[in-house]
Image (cartoon, helix red, strand yellow):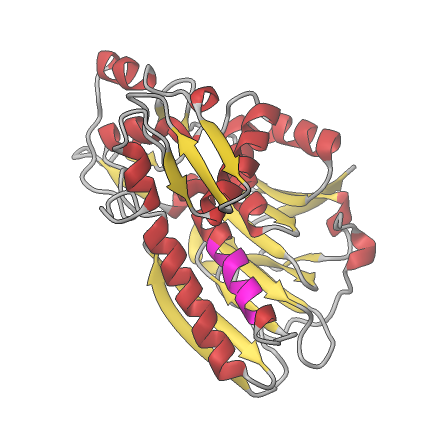
Amino acid sequence: MKLTKTNFKLISLALCAAMLLPLCACGEESADASVTAMGAAFTVTAYGKGREKAASDAAGVITAIGDMLDNDNTESAVYALNHADGQSVVVPSQLVDIYTEAKTVYEQTHGALDLTIYPVLKLWGFGGNTGGELYVPTKGEIKEQLEKLNFDGITTQDFPDSGTVTMTLPTGSEITFNAGSQGCAADGAANALQVDGVSSGIISAPGCVETVGAKPDGSQWNIAVEDPDDPSRSLGYITAGETAICTSGSYRYSLKDDDGNTYGHIFDPDTGKPVISDLKSVTVICTSGIRADLLSTALFVIGKKDALTYWRRYGDFQMILVTDTNQVLCTSGLTEAFTLNDSAYTVSFTE
């Protein structure tokens, strides 16, 4: 479903919250479960009958997906892929889901999102879920690691009789699914809530929020969008029903050198360096957490002009671009859905 202004109804703000956090849910009894996975704190809130079990089950799914996508976990599918030396590895369906969507975004953005950038990230010190110590490499070192990027060389094969899928990485390549990990976990948790019979719930993490149904009283959710200049504040909020919302920006995680220079965690696959963008953040709103997560990263890499061109061409999502000049640029489907509450920014809507 394409999110247009007809999918949203503006309701009053009940509470100001930080980035991508749900605002109040009308006093209905709820059950909450919290878990840390992929270096991020997730909260699951479920309403209605069976809410305690549903919230617990959803949190368990998030943990399982986090373990599965952990590059440093020797038992994970990703670790197995990166150490298979070109051999095929049986992989879980969630990993295939991320790869499939990432391949689409990779092709549509001419390589702006490349999951095989992991050797470059490790070189700079951004390898794990929480990264490590910054190292600013030489041009030669970057070139050497860039030669290992080979997203086009990945192959998959289905085995319908056993219900399994194998994936094969080119020898020398390594992959990371971090760009889609929070969205994948949110999708999995939302599905777990629905399987347990929950018709109203929300999953929130620092970079992604996914909702199940509307609020218990039938009204829509208010999701606050973080101010990239001050992550403790929100610059505005989105009013929506069942949806997925993910935000990317270099401000979300960075490392500093001894001279105080800051290097963001989102890398340009062409240069092997942290992205220098005319955007502070990109928020994507669509029906899939995986797509929202991956696409927000790719659009941040390509910048304002190309992000708008991409949206106009494909248009199966809505987005909010926060520019380096403090302009909040929203796509037209958010005309009645986004409310700015920070006077440091100006907002406009584009066709």
In-image side of 215 versus 157 (left or right):
right
**Residue displayed at 35% across by 50% down:** 68
Q: Is residue 33 above or below residue 156?
A: below
Q: How many marks?
A: 0
On screen, residue 5 versus residue 289, left or right, reads right
Instruction: Decide which of 90, 162 is in the foreground and name it.
Output: 162
Tell me the magenta residue range: 185-193
- Residue 39 appears anywhere in the view: yes
Q: Which residue does the image show at 25% across and 33% down from the upper left?
A: 83
Q: Is residue 187 magenta?
A: yes
In the image, farthest residue toward the front: 161
Which residue is pictured at 51% across the width and 76% down the height?
54
303 to the left or right of 148: right
Where does the image place residue 99, in percent across and percent down from the top left? 49, 37
Q: Nearer the viewer, residue 3 or 325?
A: 3
Q: Can the viewer see residue 281 in this picture?
A: no
Res 50 → quadrant: bottom right
Q: Nearer the viewer, residue 315 or 103?
A: 103
Position in image of residue 76 (x %, y %): 30, 47
Our reading of the magenta stretch's main secondary structure is: helix
Most distant residue in the right direction: 6
